[in-house]
Amino acid sequence: MANEVIVANKTEDTIVCYAPTMITTNGVWQGDNPLDYSLPLFILQLTLIVVATRVLVFILKPFRQPRVISEILGGVILGPSVLGRSTTFANTVFPLRSVMVLETMANVGLLYFLFLVGVEMDISVIRRTGKKALAIALSGMVLPFLIGAAFSFLLHKRDQSMTQGTFILFLGVALSVTAFPVLARILAELKLINQELGRIAMSSALVNDMCAWILLALAIALSENKSKSPLASLWVVLSSAGFVVICIFVIRPAISWMIRKTPEGENFSEFNVCLILTGVMISGFLTDAIGTHSVFGAFIFGLVIPNGPLGVTLIEKLEDFVSGLLLPLFFAISGLKTNISTIKDSSTWAILMLVIVLSCAGKIAGTVAVAFFYDMPIREGITLGLLMNTKGLVEMIVLNVGKDQEVLDDEAFAIMVVVAVVMTGIITPIVTTIYRPARKFVPYKRRSIQSSKSDAELRVLVCIHTPRNVPTIINLLEASYPTKKSPICVYVLHLVELTGRASAMLIVHNTRKSGRPALNRTQAQSDHIINAFENYEQHAGCVSVQPLTAISPYSTMHEDICGLAEDKRVAFIIIPFHKQQTVDGGMEATNPAFRMVNQNVLANAPCSVGVLVDRGLNGSTRLAPNQVSHNVVVLFFGGPDDREALSYAWRMSEHPGISLTVMRFVPGEDAHEHHALHPSGDLNDPMMLAVETDMEREKQLDEELINNFRLKNGNDESVVYVEKVVNNGEETVAVIRSMDNVHDLFIVGRGQGMISPLTAGLTDWSECPELGAIGDLLASSDFAATVSVLVVEQYIGMGQQGDVVGTPDSSEQPSQPFSNINQHINRRSPPPKGQNVFSP
């Protein structure tokens, strides 16, 4: 290895001789140092980069920072700015001779990543963006571009071989781009996706991204020729245009033919996939040979691949490997090239600050102007402007190419990287403080089925994780008896986890109408679910369905659900239980995160909630609505949750095809004696008295509802009312187990806060306490009858509603000590700090 430094006209050229034999080592025992060989060294570098990135992702997660930032910072930390300051570290782990291998691999990763971006991007979305988004995208590009041009005169050094024009292009593009994939993730994290603002931001970013690509290709074409005739640039531009034309008119039809040849539902042959992956490299080679960057070719090649199953296959095959392993390499290399210590004098730092502030301000000003023109609130305009400042991949490519072409020196490069990181990093915190979507606090009364009028619309929010729960839920809705007098409005919410790799386009497409091929598995599921419900809506009368998608991390998913329920004034939320039935009738957990979502929803819901333990509800959706036949059982112990369960079943019982059995459990003599001994302490204690009074009140409400129910349904043959006298938990279980096996659905209350001797001891060994004692018993695997169970929790105002607990229609305020007891009795876990569900 020979390193010689030739100092001539003030630039240092380091010549690195490369020994082709030194790829793999002979081993430590032979006395070799593995780090002297390129393969072990590369493996070590890759591991370090991925580990550093992942650790940073983990650290920055609470600050809601996009992954790009961790990737660039990881590179900066490993590079000359932090760890690389120690020469031993720099020379051992990132010696000069290794840079070639690293850069090559990083560019391969970039090539495939941009191919994927191209595959995911859908040009037809751009065609449909609408004038507003278009105007915002353009105004958000023009102003920063001009600012960049103005500053290029300050930053441009006379002795550079670069023409002023190219320098302007580079700086302008770097300042004016918006990173579409990063923006999509930020929007999803801030829960702005399903709002108008989010949609506009997405569309404008898409347009912006496309413009940035065209400008980038131009900038590269212009920068490639330094001394040659200006005709060279023209040739580059023309041949690039030719390449695009060939892709559209030759390659796209060829790929479409390949797709048509593959039968629907079959996998694409290995040969076809291999062909396309090779095509990526060929197009990269061609555009590089033409004189634009190789990534441009890969991107165009990805764009011409038609949306649909082929895209899905490619994304699934490549995504994890490319964006998990190879792409961080590219960002890390940008960080490794960044040496913050080259920014020495304070004047440069001042210019740097000025550039950041002005380009941010330029984008915001441009956006606010358009927003003003379209009569949008100023606050929304500013938020949009901030969101358009997200930087990411395109920005880094521009900077790297600029550095390779010597458009940017080390100092300018370091400045621009810092600008990119700072601009993207400050967005989430600022937007969260500025833009709090006006939560219209709706003090609506009908927050439970019991309080809903029998002649008004019933609004139900159905949450779905997988298409598997759809048939049962549709049958349950059909059984809820939608009529002209009381139609049902169903909001179907498909819950999608926001993972590190949720592709940006998935997030956009979820706001679209179906009828286009799906982009990936999640979206295919979304389409299945929506189609099933739309089909149901057409066949059933008096039902309206609105499909929606919530994309968020499981930890905050309940906020989406509860927020939507509040906005849409829903009376009942149906969420699927986190376990599914296996073939042999047992129950197995599908995803532990679903359970957390359910617990959070039960704790924070602004209305009544039903957890559906799905074991099938036999009733084919093909039957005409009047042919549904179900045997529904309500197990009634008393308390608000049981009253809600009875109210729901009562509504169902009006359906001609449903027979309802209400089994009321009445405490026997022993139970009363047993219970009288139970409250510890003296009866003169006001706390105990209040609890007793409250128990009496609950009993009174139970009696009223039951008597009313029996009065109204006395002559109805399809409704059976039975009372069972039991003394303790064991007898209760025995009665439930002895029921005949003709039922298809149990509806039970969750029984929160009800201290009943009849369920005493049942909770001691329950697997899922969130279902309450009886719900857990019915949902457990060892329960003989494999019947679906709906566990209902009635919404009880937390004192803020002005409703007395239990009777949502009465309006007198409970007295103070009493409401404290209510809080005590309805042992609901309070909402987490800062998320009071009812505050506006």
Image (cartoon, helix red, strand yellow):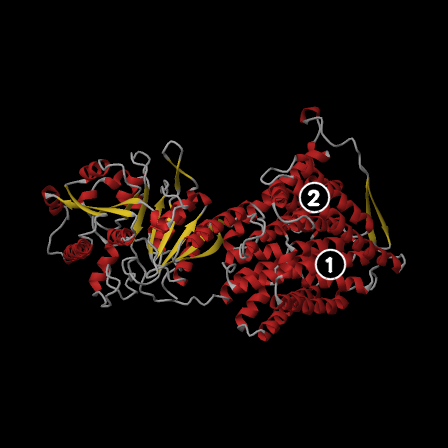
Q: Residue at point 42% right, 42% down?
A: 592
Along the line of sight, which residue is nearer the eye, 319 or 310?
A: 310
Foreground residue among 144 and 245: 245
Residue 257: which numbered mark, if any? 2
Is residue 85 in sight in this rendering? no
Residue beneath the point at 60% across and 61% down: 203
**The residue under label 1 is which amino acid type?**
Ile
Instruction: First in sequence, mark 1 or 2: give its number.
Output: 1
x and y percent of residue 132 in the render? Answer: 60, 68
Dot 2 surroundings within 10 Å: few (below 14), some, or many (20 or more)?
Answer: few
Q: Is residue 664 left or right of residue 779?
A: left
Residue 134 point in image, percent of width and height = 64, 66
Quadrant of the frame with the C terminus = bottom left
Residue 302 seen by the camera? yes
- Label 1 environment density (alpha carbons within 10 Å; few <14, some 14–19, many ≥20): few
Q: Which mark is residue 33?
A: none
Q: Is residue 425 left or right of residue 665?
A: right
Q: Quadrant of residue 482?
A: bottom left
Label ID, residue 214: 1
In the rendered image, residue 473, in percent from the top left (x then y), is placed at: 39, 48
